[in-house]
Amino acid sequence: MDDMNDDRLMRYKRHLMLPQLDMAGQQKLLDSKVLVIGAGGLGSPVLLYLAAAGIGYLTFYDPDTVEVSNLQRQVLHDSGQLGRAKSDSARERLNAINPDVHLTAVAEPLEGDALTVQVAAADLVVDCSDNFTTRFAVNRACVAQSRPLVSGAVIRMEGQVSVFKGHLDDAPCYRCLYREDEYNDETCTSSGVLGPVVGIIGSIQATEAIKLLAGIGTDLCGRLLLLDAEVMRFNEIRLKKDPACPVCSAS
């Protein structure tokens, strides 16, 4: 993207006032390309905050349509968007928030060769999907293409978030945390979810993405942040690379 103009100076003024970010950091955000998987519960706060922050190029995939049961937590959409593709609904809302951002919205699942291509084209990937099959596939692509992955998940009143850099020698990937043959998909459709919890976890994902892209702070790589919203307590688990991991150890 072009350098700062008067509109950008005003729009991102509160970022520019941060000594950790300032002009150089904001320019990195404006030049960044981010791939977001999902425009639902987690994708809503992630996309809203990344667009507002001035991420230059946002690409997101979601094959679903807006349903009335989504509106309790998927704040990117509203009642006027019922029946529309979530990708279209999201693009319209995000463009209204920040027309400075280049948006690519696709109403299809992202898988196979297309997943590899899109991950390779991005500087960073944010996984806001709701199933293990997609999470494992996205993780494999990120390791193969040497891209950092910001991963979040929520069920009922619990959430978790971490950053995975499995392409690095000393960093774990998502597969180091979960074995593919040990977990069945359990979604909020079958188990329920407290709406604000996805907002908390999604906001943390957006924060980690911005920090990684701007090169500021200490990210969650090697740490799994756990939220129990019923008692409003955060816990942290240290993660290490699994030397037997079939995804990242071989790399």
Image: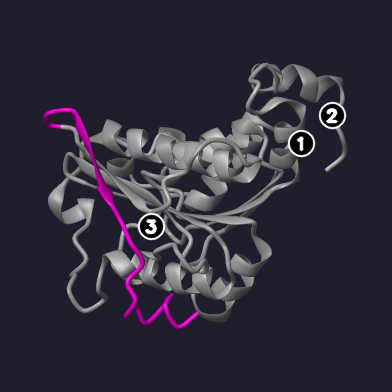
Q: Which mark is residue 27?
A: 1
Secondary structure of the residue carrying numbered label 3 = loop
Give whichever of discs 1 and 3 has the lower sequence position.
1
| Mark-to-mark CA distance, 2 and 1 | 8 Å
Q: Nearer the viewer, residue 211 or 118?
A: 211
- In the rendered view, does 6 fall on the left or right side of 81? right
Disc 3 designates what residue? 129
Question: Quarter of the image containing the N terminus?
Answer: top right
Residue at 70% over, 23% down: 12
Which contiguous range is marked in magenta?
230-251
Percent coordinates x, y for residue 182 in the rendering: 17, 74
Secondary structure of the residue carrying numbered label 1 = helix
Amino acid at circle 2: Met
- In the rendered view, does 81 fall on the left or right side of 229? right
Amino acid at circle 1: Gln
- In the rendered view, does 79 fall on the left or right side of 15? left
Question: Is residue 147 something one can see in this rendering?
Answer: yes
Give whichever of discs 2 and 3 has the lower sequence position.
2
Amino acid at circle 3: Ser
Circle 1 or circle 3, nearest the eye: 1
Q: Is residue 108 magenta?
A: no
Residue at 45% over, 68% down: 138
Q: Is residue 234 magenta?
A: yes
Percent coordinates x, y for residue 25 in the rendering: 70, 34
Q: Can you say whether 63 is above or below 85 in the image?
A: below
Secondary structure of the residue carrying numbered label 2 = loop
Question: Is residue 81 something one can see in this rendering?
Answer: no
Disc 2 designates what residue? 4
| Mark-to-mark CA distance, 1 and 3 | 29 Å
Give whichever of discs 2 and 1 has the lower sequence position.
2
Q: Nearer the viewer, residue 109 or 57?
A: 57
Percent coordinates x, y for residue 194 in the rendering: 21, 36
